[in-house]
Amino acid sequence: MRRTTVLVAVLLLVTAGCGTPEEARPVAAEATASVPRPLNVADPAEVPSPAPVPQCDPRASLRPKGALPEAGAMPAGSTMAGIVTNGRLLIGIDQNAYLFGFRDPATGELAGFEIDMAREVARAIFGDPEKVQFRAITTADRIPVLENNEVDLVIRTMTMTCERWQRVSFSTEYIASRQRLLVRKADGIKDFADLEPGSKVCATRGSTSIVTIDEQPGDLVPVSTDSTLDCLVLLQQHQVDAVSTIDVLLAGLAAQDPATVVTGTPVSDEPAGIGIPKNRPDMVRFVNGVLERMRADGTWTRIYDRWLRSRLGPAGPPRAVYQD
């Protein structure tokens, strides 16, 4: 009797699985898989309209006044004295730019050329390069956080332009760069002219690179992301045809993906300066004094050689240009 019951149960299970006539079964929609995208991709990107601004030399900053004060003994009432009172230097940086500002996977700490630059400013103020607090920001955040006095400085490959000088101040140039292309080696692209009409070219939102891409011939489509690393992801996924920003950042992307290459004739001049709030001229002069010392005592060269020489070749610090 028990044996009969088990057999009946098995038969019921089998018939339950195949009892529905084929023609009566619902037809499932064809499955489709979309390639995931980083957050906040704009395709096409919003290209800002150029605003009329007075002509200037974007490299020209304020000259240091005399020797730097002793670390920990900033002039009373100065911006630097306020930073000492706060107990740390607050700096906006990139944490996704390999070689410039990134999380070292071996230590979990921020590292890179710009991180070391930031520590030198902290050393000059406090006598301690560790008295710095980093705030990761996007490209588009750079000017707003300075205008709102949310940070003391921004060191994030920020191109000095006459338009930006109307809103913030800059140090003298600390790294020279030009806008070029990063492409997949297999595509054989050598320059902008090799891109087909309608090709998608990626850069970060709020960057000068977006405008430069839009200015190139060939009806290219600018695509924007929050970070340059997101552009590399889109290139790897074949969602864009190229990445275009300053060559020093492209070198960091190429170092992470040997299937890509930096190529093309430079299409812009991109001097990078340390961003400083507009109402802090004493801080501008102080930072420029720190940069002068770094150029003179070899600190700039030591930091450059540590992070960039193997990728970009030998280089010296950019010459300081002053407006006064």
Image (cartoon, rainbow, N blue to C red):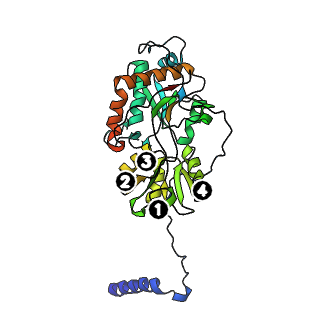
Find residue 250 and name its label: 3
The quarter of the displayed image where residue 140 is located: top right
**Gap between marks 2 and 1, in whole Å?**
14 Å
How crowded pointer 2 is (Cα within 10 Å; few <14, some 14-19, many 20+) is rated as few
- Left or right, 238 with respect to 140, comes to left
**Nearer-the-camera pick, 36 or 275:** 275
Query: In this figure, which residue is indicated by the disc labeled 2?
Result: 257
Mark closer to the chain start, 3 or 2: 3
- Left or right, 130 with respect to 38, comes to left
Mark closer to the chain start, 2 or 1: 1
**Gap between marks 3 and 2, in whole Å?**
11 Å
Q: Amino acid at mark 3?
A: Leu
Pinpoint residue 245: horizontal percent, then vertical percent: 49, 47
**Nearer-the-camera pick, 310 or 88:** 310
Mark closer to the chain start, 4 or 1: 4
Find residue 238 and name its label: 1
Q: Amino acid at mark 4?
A: Pro
Pinpoint residue 228: horizontal percent, then vertical percent: 48, 47
Outermost residue toward the right in this view: 52
Mark closer to the chain start, 4 or 2: 4
Residue 270 visible in the displayed image: yes
